[in-house]
Amino acid sequence: MKKAGQNKVFCLVIIRKPSKITPDDKSMTIKKGKKRKISYELPQGSTSSKITFSSSNKKIATVSSAGVVKAKKKGKYTITLRTFNGKSAKVKIKVK
């Protein structure tokens, strides 16, 4: 039973799996001992419940689950970003 002045509203929200992931920077330079966050974009209307980050060489730099890179020593390596449905992108990192 409805009370006076009450209305119900229904809304259909469609969220799509991402078709790609695009880092804001394709490459970056970080000074040894410093940290920098990797930011990215997903296509409009899509979301990913989890983005994972991995480093090609943990001796040179590590990356946290939030995408924060910590430069440990000089060198070059790659960070890979991956969505829950397997879409990935790479960021080239140079540590000075």
Image: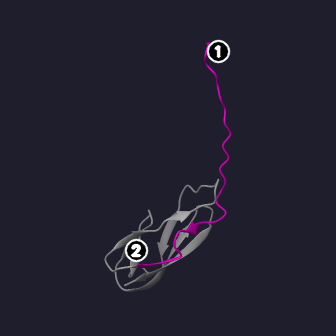
Task: Identify residue type, mark 1.
Answer: Lys
- Name the element at disc 2: strand
Mark 2 or mark 1: which is in front? 1
Please determine whether, in this image, residue 19 is positioned above or below residue 79. Answer: above
- Name the element at disc 1: loop
- Which portion, as a residue range, is magenta? 1-29
2 or 1: tag closer to the N-terminus? 1
Q: Which mark is residue 45?
A: none
Residue at x 55%, y 55% (from the top left corner): 49
Quadrant location, the N terminus:
top right
Q: Which mark is residue 62?
A: 2
Q: Is residue 12 magenta?
A: yes
Residue at x 67%, y 54% (from the top left corner): 16
Residue at x 48%, y 72% (from the top left corner): 54
Q: Is residue 26 magenta?
A: yes
Q: Which mark is residue 2?
A: 1
Q: State the residue lying farthest toward the bottom.
A: 75
Q: State the residue lying farthest toward the left.
A: 33
Please determine whether, in this image, residue 88 is positioned above or below residue 27. Answer: above
Label tally: 2
Q: Between residue 5 and residue 15, name the one nearer to us.
A: 5
Name the spot of residue 22 as percent of width and height, x first: 58, 68
Residue at x 49%, y 65% (from the top left corner): 39
Task: Identify residue type, mark 2.
Answer: Thr
The image quadrant that residue 8 belongs to is: top right
Magenta segment main secondary structure: loop
Label 1 neighbourhood size at 10 Å, few (<14), some (14-19), many (20+)?
Answer: few
Name the spot of residue 2 as percent of width and height, x first: 64, 15
Q: Is residue 5 left or right of residue 70?
A: right
